[in-house]
């Protein structure tokens, strides 16, 4: 028969609780670091349209938008053709692109793509979209002094994820702004849209999930600790009461003396009965 030392029985539940607590801390730390960091996959997204065109007699040829592979799934490019009212005469040819779900970084790359559409020109363009609180500010500059008015055309449209509150462009919808950039000049593009940060909303959702997980894990730790609690009596503590009280030495002696006296009385009674019969 193997005897389990009391110290070992007491150490078991503590080790279980300690191990469980360690696992909980590691899990919570990874979740907390992930959800409290501003999400890089959830954030402001931009959509819109780009038209770059020129007259058919332009010796430089029709402008073409060269989309990098990293953005190909978010940008659709088609040929563009503008005709007169009768449809018989072609006024401009070029490229039209529809873009959607672009991050702020990808949105900024559109400026270089537009500038590269006109070969052998020194035009330059820069655009950016940055958040400040609940406002997304789109800012841009364009130097089209190397292009020819009445021949070349650049139309840039952007749609935000919320309503536009200020712009120097043409607001074609509650969330959409367009610019027909002035050819042969320098210009600016400004637009402000107001809506909550999607990344902050994602962090809030993670926080609720983390709270629920914490409650469940704490409940499990308490349950494990309760089931594996030490049930052995503590040193110096009174013994647990049972259905039959334990006899003390004094009580046992008194009981033995009473039994002996009863035996003697029985023996005397038997002798007296025997004598009477004789």
Image (cartoon, rainbow, N blue to C red):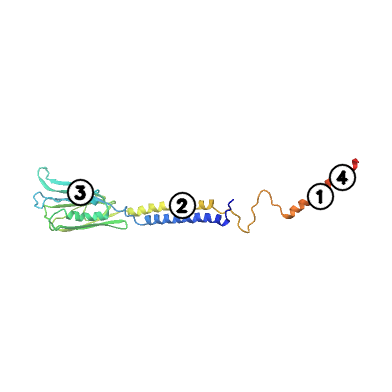
Q: Is residue 154 left or right of residue 275?
A: left
Q: How much space separates mark 2 and mark 1, taking CA atoms?
A: 68 Å
Q: Which residue is mark 3?
A: 97
Q: CA distance from mark 2 to mark 3?
A: 51 Å
Residue for badge 1? 261
Q: Quadrant of residue 23?
A: bottom left
Q: Nearer the observer, disc 3 or disc 4?
A: 4
Q: Mark 2 vs mark 4: give the one in front.
A: 4
Which element is circle 4 on?
Answer: helix
Q: Which of disc 3 and disc 2 is earlier in sequence?
A: 3
* Contact (Cβ within 8 Å) of mark 3 with mark 4: no
Q: Are marks 2 and 1 in contact (CB under 8 Å)?
A: no
The residue sitting at 18% across, 54% down in the picture is 114
Q: Quadrant of residue 182?
A: bottom left
Between 115 and 181, the residue placed more toward the observer is 115
Instruction: Residue lying at the far right in this picture: please name it.
Output: 278
Q: CA distance from mark 2 to mark 4?
A: 81 Å
- Residue under label 4, please give it: 271
Q: Earlier in the sequence, mark 3 or mark 4?
A: 3
Give SS at disc 2.
helix
Earlier residue among tags 2 and 1:
2
The answer to whether the residues at label 1 and label 4 have Cβ atoms under 8 Å apart is no
Mark 1: give few (<14), some (14-19) or many (20+) Cα within 10 Å: few
- Residue 217 image label: 2
Q: Secondary structure at mark 3?
A: strand
Report x, y in % for residue 13.
52, 54
């Amino acid at each position: 028969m193997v005897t389990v030392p009391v110290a070992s029985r007491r150490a078991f539940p503590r080790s279980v609780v300690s191990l469980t607590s360690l696992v909980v801390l590691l899990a919570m730390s990874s979740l907390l670091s992930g959800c409290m960091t501003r999400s890089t996959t959830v954030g402001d997204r931009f959509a819109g349209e780009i038209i770059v065109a020129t007259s058919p007699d332009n010796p430089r040829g029709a402008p073409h938008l060269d989309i990098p592979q990293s953005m190909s799934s978010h940008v659709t490019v088609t040929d563009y053709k503008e005709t007169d009212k009768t449809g018989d005469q072609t006024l401009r040819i070029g490229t039209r692109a529809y873009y959607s779900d672009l991050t702020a970084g990808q949105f900024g790359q559109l400026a270089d793509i537009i500038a590269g559409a006109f070969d052998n020109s020194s035009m330059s363009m820069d655009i950016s979209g940055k958040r400040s609180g609940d406002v997304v500010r789109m800012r841009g500059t364009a130097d089209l002094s190397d292009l020819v008015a009445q021949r070349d055309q650049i139309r840039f449209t952007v749609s935000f994820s919320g309503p536009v509150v200020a712009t120097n462009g043409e607001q074609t919808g509650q969330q959409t702004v367009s610019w027909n950039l002035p050819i042969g000049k320098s210009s600016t593009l400004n637009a402000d849209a107001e809506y909550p940060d999607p990344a902050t909303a994602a962090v809030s959702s993670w926080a609720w999930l983390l709270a629920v997980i914490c409650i469940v894990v704490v409940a499990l730790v308490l349950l494990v600790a309760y089931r594996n609690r030490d049930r052995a009596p503590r040193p110096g503590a009174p013994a647990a009461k049972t259905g039959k009280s334990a006899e003390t030495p004094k009580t046992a002696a008194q009981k033995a003396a009473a039994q002996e006296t009863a035996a003697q009385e029985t023996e005397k009674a038997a002798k007296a009965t025997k004598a009477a019969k004789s």
